[in-house]
Image: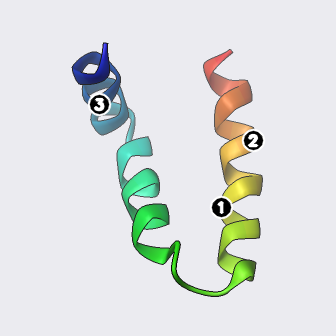
Amino acid sequence: MLLVSHAIRILTGDYHLFYKYKNTRNDNRTKKKMFRNQQKSYIYKDM
């Protein structure tokens, strides 16, 4: 399941956003807020 989700993320380009979030997790909260807003739109897309 994890490998499949990773493959889908890489194909769709969502993987880059996820990786970016991992790296920016230590940064200020504004980046987190921005990503959360993006994440919401992606979740709706997947549904």
Residue where numbered disc 1 is placed: 35
Q: Earlier in the sequence, mark 2 or mark 1?
A: 1
Q: How crowded is mark 2: few (under 14 residues within 10 Å), some or many (20 or more)?
A: few
Q: In this view, does 43 lie above or below 1?
A: below
Instruction: Say which residue appears at 49% left-offset and 76% top-offset.
Output: 24
Mark 2 is on which residue type? Lys
Q: Is residue 28 above or below residue 6?
A: below
**Considering the numbered disc 1 on the image, is that residue within a helix, a strand or a loop?**
helix
**Considering the numbered disc 2 on the image, is that residue within a helix, a strand or a loop?**
helix
Instruction: Say which residue appears at 68% left-offset and 15% top-offset.
Output: 47
**Considering the numbered disc 3 on the image, is that residue within a helix, a strand or a loop?**
helix
Mark 3–mark 2 distance (CA, rounded to whole Å): 18 Å
Where residue 30 sits, quadrant-wise, is: bottom right
Where residue 10 sits, quadrant-wise, is: top left
Mark 1 is on which residue type? Phe
Residue 11, horizontal then vertical, whole percent? 29, 32
Mark 2–mark 1 distance (CA, rounded to whole Å): 9 Å
Mark 3 is on which residue type? His
Q: Viewed as shown, does residue 42 lie left or right of 33?
A: left
Q: Viewed as shown, does residue 15 lie left or right of 45?
A: left
Residue 4, horizontal then vertical, whole percent? 27, 17
Residue where numbered disc 3 is placed: 6
Q: Is residue 26 above or below residue 41?
A: below
Instruction: Say which residue appears at 35% left-offset and 23% top-offset.
Output: 5
